[in-house]
Image: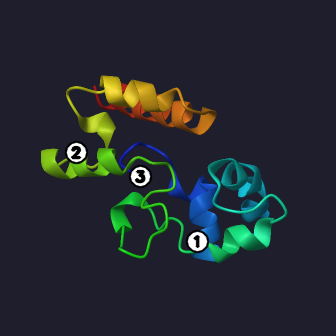
């Protein structure tokens, strides 16, 4: 699990990087085009050529294209500084930065709900 609460094994960028999954790459084509990372006429093969995209936030290396497929590198750094395993263990969770991030897409929202449920089960 990423610091932000995303299950990396369910992440398209992670699947492309770690397993070379063409199906996952195809799902990322529109996003990559919108970011200008691949051309209008390029497809899943171009996404695969961007490897390594994401190795998970706990395994960032200099060769990672995106540093963290979900963009939650800041959460990893914050968790390391606070010596916690994920944002859900933080006394300030969910902070303003996390709430903003969670609003970006459904997988981020699901990550927040997952961490909130973990907190409920601990307390």
| Crowd class of label 2 (few under 14; some 14 to 19; many from 20; radius 10 Å) | some
> Marks 2 and 3, Cα distance to the nearest angstrom?
12 Å
Which residue carries the number 1 mark? Answer: 17
Q: Earlier in the sequence, mark 3 or mark 1?
A: 3
Q: Nearer the viewer, mark 2 or mark 3?
A: 2
Task: Give the x, y percent position of residue 105.
Answer: 60, 33
Q: Earlier in the sequence, mark 2 or mark 3?
A: 3
Which residue carries the number 3 mark? Answer: 2
Task: Give the x, y percent position of residue 75.
Answer: 31, 44
> Marks 2 and 1, Cα distance to the nearest angstrom?
24 Å
Q: Is residue 7 left or right of residue 40?
A: left
| Crowd class of label 1 (few under 14; some 14 to 19; many from 20; radius 10 Å) | many
| Residue at the spot 27% in from the left edge and 49% down from the top edge | 85
Which residue carries the number 2 mark? Answer: 78
The answer to whether marks 2 and 1 mark residues whose Cβ atoms lie closer than 8 Å is no
> Marks 3 and 1, Cα distance to the nearest angstrom?
15 Å
Q: Is residue 33 above or below residue 89?
A: below
Could you tell me if residue 20 is visible in this image? Answer: no
Q: Which quadrant of the figure has residue 9?
A: bottom right
| Residue at the spot 31% in from the left edge and 38% down from the top edge | 87
Foreground of the two, 64 or 119 = 64
| Residue at the spot 30% in from the left edge and 31% down from the top edge | 122
Foreground of the two, 13 or 83 = 13
Total number of numbered discs in the rendering: 3
- Kind of element beneath mark 1: helix
Foreground of the two, 39 or 63 = 39
Q: Is residue 97 left or right of residue 69?
A: left
| Crowd class of label 3 (few under 14; some 14 to 19; many from 20; radius 10 Å) | many
The answer to whether marks 3 and 1 mark residues whose Cβ atoms lie closer than 8 Å is no
């Amino acid at each position: 699990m990423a610091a932000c609460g995303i299950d990396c094994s369910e992440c398209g960028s992670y699947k492309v990087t770690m397993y070379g999954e063409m199906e996952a790459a195809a799902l990322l084509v529109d996003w990559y085009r919108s970011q200008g990372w691949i051309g209008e006429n390029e497809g899943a093969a171009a996404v695969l050529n961007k490897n390594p995209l994401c190795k998970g936030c706990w395994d960032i290396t200099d060769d990672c294209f995106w540093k963290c497929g979900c963009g939650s590198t800041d959460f990893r750094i914050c968790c390391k500084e606070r010596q916690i395993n994920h944002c859900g263990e933080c006394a300030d969770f969910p902070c303003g930065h996390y709430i903003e991030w969670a609003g970006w897409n459904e997988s981020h929202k699901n990550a927040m709900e997952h961490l909130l449920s973990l907190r409920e089960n601990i307390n």
